[in-house]
Amino acid sequence: ARPSRVIMVGSVTGNDNTVGGGGVYPIADLKDLEGFKAGFKDPISMADGYNFIGAKAYKDSKLSLMMLSNCLHDRYHRQTNIAFSAIYPGCIAESPLFREKREWFRKLFPAFMKYITGGFVSEQEAGTRLFQVAHDPRCSKSGVYWSWNGGPREGRGEAALERDGQILGGGGGGGGWDSIYENDQSDKVLDREKSANLFKYSTEITGAAWPAPHQPKSPCPTLKVVGAVTEFMHAKEELKRMKPMPGTVGAGATLAGATTKAADVVVGSTIGSLVSKLQDKLLGPLPETALTGSFEADARAARKEEEGTRKGFGRRLFSRLRNRRQNRRRANAAAEAAASTTLAPDAQPVVTTVDTPEPAAVQDDELSAAELEAMEQRILGVITGETPADGVEVVPDSPAIHEESRNGQRAPEAESEAAQPAA
């Protein structure tokens, strides 16, 4: 059987890239589909939600049909091979479409369309054009807007009178079977996003039921079995992945109770185990990076190592401060002993106590345990960024300080500082 075809009867008036559609008021325009959104409930009468104008309602309906044709083409042509298209058969000026117009208009309008615009077609000719799109092998293409008599309009004046208005041109009368062509569609007709919304709201209003879009699948029974197992495993893993945790913005989900757990055990111990063994046999072992961690894990480890380095620097700094304080105490004690002791030649040493006030440097260095602990905590906070510096400056590291910390001895600068009180 030949592929089916669905044909929407559009109009030049709904395609505003032509004079007939874009040059004659009112212009077809669905705007934001406010009438559809509101369900077209009484008294809403227009697609755009505004006041009723009969001519615009007609043009809007033609624009909607052409957009629907493209929407159905996008959704169902590939999976069904049905050809969806729209046509403009020409202006059927003698039809009951104009039954509510004044009598003089109903008499003059057909003549105007015949001899002036050339767009007139009889009802019989329009029917022939519709029949052609439904059966002509050339019209099996989907997503097309068909028209007749393409090219520039010719034969006006006496020639048109001789042919009773048979003027050539887009949509004009007199076009034969071979004058059909693919006409251009306007930007409004090709608006895919608005077409999708039009489809959605129209479906809600009419209650229409549409088949779910799908692509043909292989009838292979093995694929069906494997696909069923894969679908179950996928659903289970997705439920685990949806567990609420930092960074999850979707709604949480829970496993389906004892049934899911039982099925998980059965599948995991039978088919799941077999698949896992075959995977290891055929694909080989996993790379070491897959077993030991990921980029994120490495990044977290690097951050922890950096934080540990900062804290280690703080501990070394505190250690150096303690060693420096102890060394200064020993130096001060030695200076006091040298100042209070007098040695005579060839005689026993005589010890004389001199009441000398302690140097200011020693007094500054004599800190209580609580003050030292507070200073250490403050420096550690500055190093780790938890406490504002407020004028506290961390002295850069230096080889001399490292040497002092390792050997428990002062650097040469410390020796000279300690020797000053003795002098």
Image: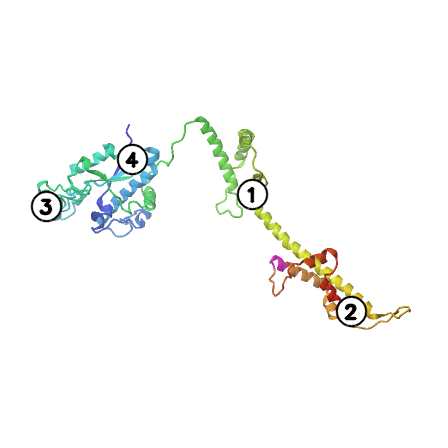
Instruction: Name the image quarter holding residue 78.
Output: top left
Q: Secondary structure at mark 4?
A: strand
Q: Residue at x 14, y 44 (%)?
A: 154
Secondary structure mainly formed by the magenta segment: helix
The first of marks 4 and 2 along the sequence is 4
Residue to which mark 1 is pinned: 294
Quadrant of the image containing the C terminus: bottom right
Q: Name the residue carrying label 4.
A: 83
The spot of residue 417 in percent (x, y) is 73, 66
Could you give the CA–CA distance between mark 4 and mark 3, rounded to whole angstroms?
A: 40 Å
Task: Find the distance from the CA under tag 3 to the CA under tag 1.
Answer: 81 Å
Q: CA distance from mark 1 to mark 4?
A: 50 Å
338 to the left or right of 40: right
Q: CA distance from mark 3 to mark 2?
A: 128 Å
Residue ID at (57%, 34%): 285
Q: Which residue is mark 3?
A: 157
Query: Picture coordinates of residue 223 (x, y %)?
Result: 45, 29
Mark nearer the viewer, 4 or 3: 3
Can residue 249 be seen here? The reply is yes
| Residue 24 against residue 356 in the figure, above or below | above
Query: In the rendered structure, which disc, 4 or 3, sits on the residue that comes first in sequence?
Result: 4
Q: Quadrant of residue 201?
A: top left
Q: Please give the residue where the numbered disc 2 appears in the rendered image.
A: 422
Question: Please, what is the three-letter code of the amino acid marked with disc 3?
Answer: Gly
Q: Earlier in the sequence, mark 1 or mark 4?
A: 4
| Mark earlier in primary sequence (3, 2) | 3
- Depth-wise, is mark 1 or mark 4 nearer the camera? 1
Q: Amino acid at mark 4?
A: Ala
Query: Is residue 316 placed above or below 352 in the rendered structure?
Result: above
**Magenta stretch?**
381-386
Which residue is most to the right? 347
